[in-house]
Every structure is written in C-alpha cells, then in structure tokens.
Image (tube, rainbow, N blue to C red):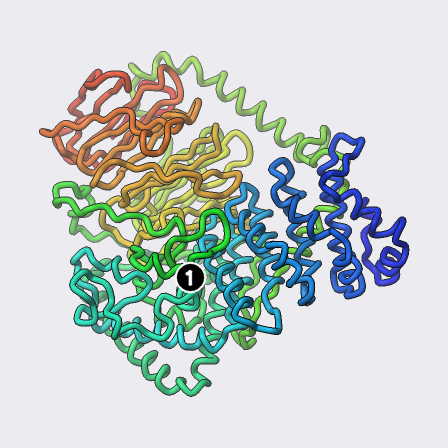
Amino acid sequence: MPLAMPTHSFVATDFVSDRDSGYMYFAVILKPTEGLPVVDSLEHKAMCAFILARLCDGYKQGQTVCNQSEIMTYCLVHLQNAENPLLRQWACLCISQLWKDLPDAKWRGIRENAPSKLAFLVRDVCCEVRAAMLYAMTTFLGIQDLTDEVARIEENISWTVMEMANDGNAMVRKELLVYFSKFIQRYENKFLVAAYEQLQEEREYRQFPPADDGNDHKMGLHYARMENRNLDGTIKATSHGVAHNSIFAAVWKHVLIMAVDPHPEVQRNATIIIDCIHSSLLQSPLGGHAQNIIDDINRRVARSAASNQSTTDPRPSTPIRQDSMTSAPTTQQSLLKRTASYLFTMPFVGGSSADTSPEHSLGRNPPKSPGAQRSPLPLRSRLPDFNAPPEQNDTAATPGTYHAAKEPMSGGFVPRKLSTPPTLPLVSTFFEWSIEYFREPQMKPNEAEEPGSTDYNERLWRRSRNEAILRETQPQKEIAGSGRWTTPAGFFNNQSQPSKMTFHQFEDHLAVSDDRDIICIWDWKKQDRLSRFSNGNPEGSRISDLQFINEDDQAFLLTGSSDGVIRIYRNYDSDKKIEVASAWRALTHLVPSNVNSGLVFDWQQVSGKLLVAGDVKVIRVWAAAPELCVVDINARSGSCVTSLTSDQMTGNIFVAGFGDGAIRVFDARNRPQEAMVKKWKDETDRVWIKSVHMQRGGQRELLSASRNGKVKLWDIRMDKPLRTINTTGQTIRTASTHEHLPVFAV
C-alpha cells in the first residue's frame, strides 16, 4: 500500500485525472458505510485517508478535486470511531490537508461543524490523535476574510484547546505551541497589549507582593495590589486592563507557563514565541515604556536574589569532580527567564472569572475559566507547625549547589541558536513524522516480537535472568526475619548527603538523590558510579521521590520533585546515553519549596498508572498509555499527603499517609467521591506519617511509620493496628519496607 503513495506531481496528476481508478477508489473505501471483506477493514480505511492526505499535500488541484467529493464528511464521521486510533489520527490529518491554505474548504468545514467535532478529541486516549487534532486546528486558522464569525470561531477553538497545556505528552504540548504561535501571529497587536500588561502586572507583583489572606485566587487570570481589589478579593473594574480576562491574555500566560515546561523541546519552542513577541513589543510605540518596566523588574530581581543569597543560603558549594565541571548546563537566554515570577511561572490558582469564558466554547467539556480545565488544584488549608517533617526544622548546613552536573535532554534535542532571530509561526513536523508509520512494512511483527532478532533475544535473556534470581532468592525468605543484617555490602562516597535511595529489583543499580537536584547511579556490587546528572528542578525545590519502573524489562528511572514535575529517564546508567523519555507537570499548582510534602507518587506496574499527591487536596491518577490524568480523587483531608502505596497485584486498593497522622484507604473501583473506604486516625498521636507501604508478597501487609518512631502493622479490614512497634525514641528521617521479606528499616 505505501507504494501507491503520491509523492510526485505526475503521480498525483494521474490520481486526479483518472476518476475511476484514481483517487475515487480510495474515497469509496473511506466511506463509513462501505464494508470491506477483510479482517482489518478500519486499517484499510486509515490507509486510504493517508493516501488522500498525501494527494492533497502541497497540490492545489488535488485539494480542489477532493473537496468536490464527500471525503471531508467521511473523515468527520471517522473522528468518532472508537475502535481504531490510526483511523482517527489520519481522519484529522486528511481534514488538515483538505483545508490547508484553501478558504473554501475551511468554510465548508464551518458549515459541517468540523471545529466542534474535532474538539471532541481534546481528551482522546491516543496522544497521536490529540496531536493530529491540534495539527488540523492549526491549519484551519488563517481565513483571510477575518469576519466577526471567523474571529469568534478561532477564539472558541483556542479556549477549547487551552487545557492541553497540561497534557502529559510532550508531542501534544509541542503541537499546542505551534497552534498558539499561529494564533499569536494572526492577532499580534492584541498579544502585544497582553504582553505589555503582563509586564505591568509583573512589576506590580514585585512592588506589592500578595498578602497571605487566602483571596489571591479570586483575582483569576490577573494580579493587582490590595488597593485595586474589592472587599471580596476580586479586581476592581477601574483596574481592568485592555486584555483583562480575554483569550489573548489567557493564551499569553499559558505560553509563559510553557516556557518553564520540564520537557526541553517544549521549553525551547515556548521561549521562541515569547522572545518574538517581546522583540516586537520593544520595537512598537510601547517599546520605551516596556523597556523601562523590564529594567525595573531586573533591578528588583537582582536585589531580591542578592538578599536571599546573603540571608538564607549559608551552605557551601558541593565539591565538583573535574569531569563534571565542563558539562555544566548553560542557561537558556530568554526575556521570560529575566522577568518571570512565581505568580506567572505556575498555572493560576482559582477561577473567579469563569463567567468570562465564551458561552459557546467547543467540545463536550469546554474550560470553565481562562485557566486550563484541570488546573488549578485546590490548595490545602495550612496546619500547625507540629505537622512539619523533621528535616524542615533542621538548621544544619548540608553542602550542595544546584545544577552542578549535566542535565539530560530528550532524544534528538537541538538547542536553539540564539544568533538566529525568532520568527512566527513555529513549524510543525508532525505530519511528516506520521507519514513514517507507512514507510515501515505493515504485515510483519515488531522487531522486539520477531524471534531471533536482537531485541527479542535480549528480552528473552533478561526474562531468564530474572527468573533465576527469583529462584535463587526464594529460600532466603525463611531466614530474613531472624538473620543478622550486619554484613556491609559496599561503601562509596556520593559527594553529597543522600536524601532518597532506591534499588533496582534485578540489576545491581542503586539510585541516590541529594536534597537538591543531583542524582547518582551506582553499581553497588562493584562500588562504581555509573552516571551523575541533574534532575533540572529549579533552585529552592528538591527531588522528593524516585523509583525504578519497568524493572522486568528495560528499566526507566522515574523522579518526582517538589515543584510538581515528574521526569522519566531512559539509559539512566550512562552519562553519554541518558535521555529524558518524558517530563510533565503532574501537580499543576505547586511552587518550588522545601516546605511541606512537595510531591509524592506511587507507580502501579500492573495497571500502568501513576498516583501523584502532595500539598493538595486530591490524589491525581495519571495513566501511562494515554499520558493523561484519568481522575482526581478527593483526599478527604485538610493536611498534605506524605506517602502513597498501593496493591501492586491488582492496582485497585491504595493507601495514603498524611501530615496529621491519618492513614486513609481508597478503592479506585469506586466513584471518586466514594473512593475512601477506610480511615485510621489516633487523635492522641497526630504525628507526620513518614511512610506507608503495602508489600507485594505474603498477605500484602501494610506497614506505616511515623516520625516519632512508631511503626504499625495493619490489616485494612480492621479498625486498629495488628501490632505497634516503638523503634526508637528519636525522630526518624526515613523508613523502608522490603517488598517480599518480613523486614523493615528506619
């Protein structure tokens, strides 16, 4: 089938001129009601959509002829096909090529309600489909006759896709930036006003920092000092800017947020957009005023940084090895980096401006506020200091500095050339990337599933090795509980105080993080350091959790930091090969801080889900396959979540420990409002829960450890603990439970 792809103009001409055996053949097969006497008929229809899209790609006559048929109508029907994601993807891409640079086709799409039908794919379970939808929306923008109707439709599309700024897939977020860049270019003057007013807000934020009165969220999308607010916390009408609560202000601030995206490619592309608009702003009639504001912000930032460094950071720098000094990351230059504050580098808290969202937003779940639909999360109410973990009360200085090692990039990442002036719009490569699928043979299995292939043999070897390790270690269970754990297995200098450690289940790998951003991977048997790198979390934040995932096969390293970001690394054991496989903001409101619990997570290998919680009132469940947040479960507490664990055999039951000493059991099979099925809380023992852990083996015992040294063994069916052990009279800093053996350590 790929051989029929029209890649040359004379082939495309043949397709168009021969109506019986040319493009109409594929159009007929694409017809939704057309049955095919083959097993994978939907796959064939996807191939037809691909061929027709290629026919229209850069070929005006092909576009014209295809638009005279019902191909667009067929594709709009296939958008609703729940069985085959490839068909939905190529239906989007075929639509994009049908109306690309062709106003008549775009008007036909409007008549057939195409933007609204595409908007239903905002939360599609396949990330390629979501990206293809964004690609189609991007090509829709640009009808030359910019009537009020066209402007309304384009603004509604922007309100609808805005929630995808919090998508877990970096490819989708990159496509969203391409859409934003074209939307910004189309309404550049309005975005210049929005950017100027944001700089004014930035300066006002630094001149008049917000009071901790709990009403900041009522300002919605913008910031204003106290005297410019009403008694209920909302901004006075007399202080509204020209772009107040407009789509242009909302899009601009989402682009600012994405300029500090944890994925390097998303961050790079967002800074290009920002620098381009700021450059235009400085060359506009507002340029002189904008430059004065930027200079003022820079002075205030410099004073604040100097003050913070002299008063709150007495810690000496980490000694850096010679081999890491040359690989220190360079700071990417951007106006945002020089002017951004915490107010605008994180998604906004609150949404009192919900009524400013267009009434006719597209899609089944239009956003209710200028912020993204799943943002913000509710902040938990602040509790007394006795709930703080012990390390937050320490004053001892631990040696360390941020970004003292190389920060891994994504595969194929190309840094931006600062000598090249930024231009809009950004150029998408998604269509070309999607074509690659059909350049591979479709009738043979994947390389890893082909017996005799290198990937297949490596996987077979790992499986045999893992089974041998399990057989060898099974007899050790009987003596583990009574044997002495006093024989040292190794000693090595980590160069900084370890904060978190985790062992690989089968490899001789030990991952160690410090209380900032540095991770070291050790071969604990050979006592050799395999790699050392920076997690990339900003100054003031820390790595709050790390874990190996997919240990049975090719393992990845999963890290969570207190700024709410999850990162996944492949080839983590090699300084040269390590890459960022994925990175996204799992908790969207957290400000980088060493206070409170930050972010905690638990990975469910059996279900491919990631539970994430922290200093918020919900436990957020992310699914690995769609790379989406599938549900927010109410934590039912005013205190922060300090530890998470789940039943690794089924993934249905999970347990959360809290800062006020409570432990709650949840059943993911219930509705989110009814998910909590058990609660333990001793009012006389309201102490920070340091760890909860449900074992994989045995009866899946649940163990909890409080910072006062009390370790409790639970049966989730019972109202009281089976056993309580007072391990130490001192404050415990860490606790760990073995997955299979009746052993724990504090």
How many marks on residues?
A: 1
Q: In this rendering, does residue 500 appear at all?
A: no
Question: Could you tell me residue 617's position as x and y percent?
Answer: 27, 42
Residue occupying the point 13% across, 45% down: 385
Q: Is residue 265 above or below residue 677?
A: below
Using the image as rendered, state which of residue 406 and residue 30 is in the foreground: 30
Q: Secondary structure at mark 1?
A: helix
Question: Could you tell me residue 621's position as x and y percent?
Answer: 40, 38
Quarter where residue 670 is shown: top left
Residue topped by disc 1: 254
Residue occupying the point 45% across, 67% down: 332
Q: Is residue 100 above or below residue 335?
A: above
Quarter where residue 723 is shown: top left
Taking 677 as reference, is 63 left or right?
right
Q: Point out the residue furthest to the left here.
A: 684
Question: Could you tell me residue 378's position as x and y percent?
Answer: 28, 48
Disc 1: CA contacts within 10 A as few (<14), some (14-19) or many (>=20)? many
The N terminus is located in which quarter?
top right
Residue occupying the point 50% across, 73% down: 187
Taking 283 as reference, is 453 left or right?
right
Quarter where residue 323 is shown: bottom left
Q: Is residue 171 above or below residue 453?
A: below
Three-letter amino acid code of the residue under disc 1? His
Residue occupying the point 84% across, 63% down: 9
Using the image as rendered, state which of residue 635 and residue 525 is in the foreground: 635
Question: Could you tell me residue 636's position as x and y percent?
Answer: 25, 36
Q: In this rendering, does residue 464 appear at all?
A: yes
The C terminus is located in which quarter?
top left
